[in-house]
Image (spheres, helix red, strand yellow):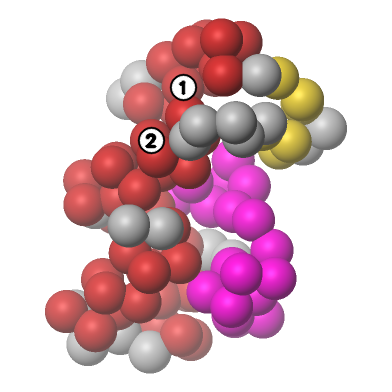
Amino acid sequence: MKIKDAIKTYQEANNLNDAQFARLLNIDRSMLSKIKSGEREPGVKVIKALLKHSPEFRKPISDYLLGEDRTLDILGIKENRQGLRGLVARIFKR
């Protein structure tokens, strides 16, 4: 499941509209809308907020970070799959 789909599912299951969920994540509603539409990729701030509020997001975020033939470009960091171990460890560390 993609992150944008996981967000939609989570919102529906918890009866949260975009304004409520954006406030919960401490992001602008417009940013949430862009992520849900696929126009923007979630950054580190959004990923951390999603993980903080629900473990349901761990699998979609792991898939996003470690997906085949993907590169990660968050905050200007470009790494291939092998170089992601440290970043993933920092994000999942609580």
For disc 2, the marked residue is: 62
Residue 90 in sight: no
Which residue is at 40% across, 39% downward?
63
For disc 1, the marked residue is: 88
Main SS, magenta residues: helix
Along the polypeptide, which appears first: circle 1 or circle 2? 2
Q: Position of residue 42 (x, y in %)?
A: 59, 53
Q: Identify the magenta region.
A: 28-49
**Above or below for 64 versus 16:** above
Closest to the observer, 70 or 43: 70
Q: Of discs 1 and 2, which sits in the foreground? A: 2
Which residue is at 67% across, 80% downward?
30
Closest to the observer, 81 or 34: 81
Residue 6 lies in the magenta-colored region: no
Left or right side of 81 for 63: left
Q: Are dots 1 and 2 in contact, CB under 8 Å?
A: yes
Closest to the observer, 77 or 14: 77
Distance between the Cα atoms at labels 1 and 2? 8 Å
**Above or below for 12 versus 42:** below
Q: Say what secondary structure mark 2 lies in.
A: helix
Q: Position of residue 46 (x, y in %)?
A: 53, 52
Q: Position of residue 86 (x, y in %)?
A: 52, 10
Looking at the rendered image, the quarter that the N terminus falls into is bottom left
Q: Position of residue 51 (x, y in %)?
A: 34, 45
- How packed mark 1 is, by other alpha carbons closer than 10 Å (few <14, some 14-19, many 20 or more), is some
Q: Say what secondary structure mark 1 lies in.
A: helix
Q: Amino acid at mark 1?
A: Val
**Above or below for 9 versus 57:** below
Give the image quarter of residue 12: bottom left
Left or right side of 2 for 77: right
